[in-house]
């Protein structure tokens, strides 16, 4: 009995993957959905009937367990009739999804299929000269592009790696060894079909500029008191010299008035 259950489970999973491949390559248009990393996204089923029996959610990594309400411990849960919410988004969530909806149509069990293309975006700031690690090179990533130069340019390709010696890729990370102002911009990850999986917008940290301004302001604040002290010192020195000269002149005049007659020895001569 257990062997039959295992065989059934294997067949069921194989059918799910086969269905996923058929949907991917059948030309069926996926509904684009987008969410911010760490946030939530809703895959709407657009089916208002209350006679839904079961729903399945399938991605490239396999079938995803869907909790029946938000109180479940998992990140994926059903909302309303058949909408599916994925919360606390991470980059590895990006990609294609198939939502299968089973519902009763009078006496028959019917099935609806909805497909989605989930795009995840994020924004980060980096200090100049610091290494930047982007954890974006997942299994479904085919290439990475950036518009930091004003137009989209490929910086990484599956099977080739990075196109610049300023970057490297290890353990699913695309790393810029030392961030420069020219590296700022958007980086997007695309799958083999050209669908955008992840977009990361990178800006230069304003903290560095603020620190420079603070240093300049502190420099100014240090210079002003020194200049004021020097001016006061010069003024005091000038005043002291003037006072000394006046006193010295008064002293000389006093001596002349005390001895107006020449010495007697000079008179006799």
Image (tube, rainbow, N blue to C red):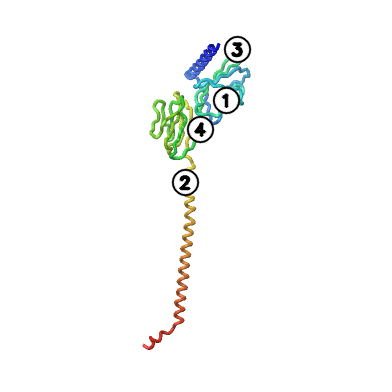
Residue 74 circle label: 1
Q: Residues within 10 Å of mark 4 (few under 14, many from 20)?
A: some
Label 1's element? loop
Q: Nearer the viewer, residue 126 or 4?
A: 4
Upstream in sequence: badge 4 or badge 1: 1
**x and y percent of residue 197 in the render?**
48, 27
> Which of the two discs, 3 and 1, labels the residue nearer the N terminus?
1
Distance, label 4 to label 1, CA atoms, is 22 Å
Spatial CA span between label 3 and label 1: 32 Å
User: For residue 52, what is the image quadrant?
Assistant: top right
First in residue order: circle 4 vs circle 3: 3
Quarter of the figure with the N terminus: top right
Measured in 3D between alpha carbons, the distance from the residue under mark 4 to the one under mark 2, in whole angstroms, is 27 Å
Work out whether mark 1 precedes mark 2 in sequence or the reverse, and give the earlier one: 1
Gap in angstroms between the C-alphas marked 4 and 3? 45 Å
Mark 1–mark 2 distance (CA, rounded to whole Å): 46 Å
Q: Secondary structure at mark 2?
A: helix
Residue receiving disc 4? 122
Callout in the foreground (3, 1): 1
Q: Earlier in the sequence, mark 4 or mark 2?
A: 4
On residue 108, which mark appears?
Answer: 3
Read off the residue under disc 2: 212
Residue visible at 51% across and 15% down? 10
């Amino acid at each position: 009995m257990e062997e039959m259950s295992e065989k059934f489970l294997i067949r069921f999973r194989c059918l799910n993957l086969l269905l996923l491949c058929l949907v991917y390559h059948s030309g069926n248009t996926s509904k684009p959905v987008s969410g911010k990393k760490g946030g939530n996204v809703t895959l709407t089923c657009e089916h208002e009937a209350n006679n839904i029996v079961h729903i399945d959610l399938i991605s490239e990594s396999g079938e995803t367990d869907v909790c029946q309400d938000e109180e479940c411990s998992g990140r994926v849960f059903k909302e309303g009739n058949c909408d599916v919410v994925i919360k606390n988004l991470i980059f590895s969530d990006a990609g294609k999804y198939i939502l299968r909806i089973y519902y009763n149509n009078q006496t028959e069990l019917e099935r609806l299929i909805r497909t989605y293309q989930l795009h995840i975006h994020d924004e980060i700031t980096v200090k100049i000269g610091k290494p930047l690690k982007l954890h974006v090179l997942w299994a479904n990533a085919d290439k990475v592009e950036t518009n930091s130069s004003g137009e989209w340019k490929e910086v990484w390709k599956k099977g080739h790696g990075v196109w610049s010696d300023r970057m490297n890729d290890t353990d699913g990370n695309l790393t810029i060894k030392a961030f420069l102002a020219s590296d700022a911009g958007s980086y997007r990850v695309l799958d083999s079909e050209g669908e955008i999986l992840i977009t990361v917008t990178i800006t230069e940290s304003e903290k560095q500029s603020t620190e420079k301004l603070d240093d300049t302001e502190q420099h100014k604040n240090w210079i002003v008191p020194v200049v004021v002290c020097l001016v006061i010192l010069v003024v005091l020195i000038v005043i002291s010299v003037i006072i000394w000269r006046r006193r010295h002149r008064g002293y000389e005049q006093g001596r002349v008035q005390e001895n107006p007659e020449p010495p007697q020895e000079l008179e006799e001569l």
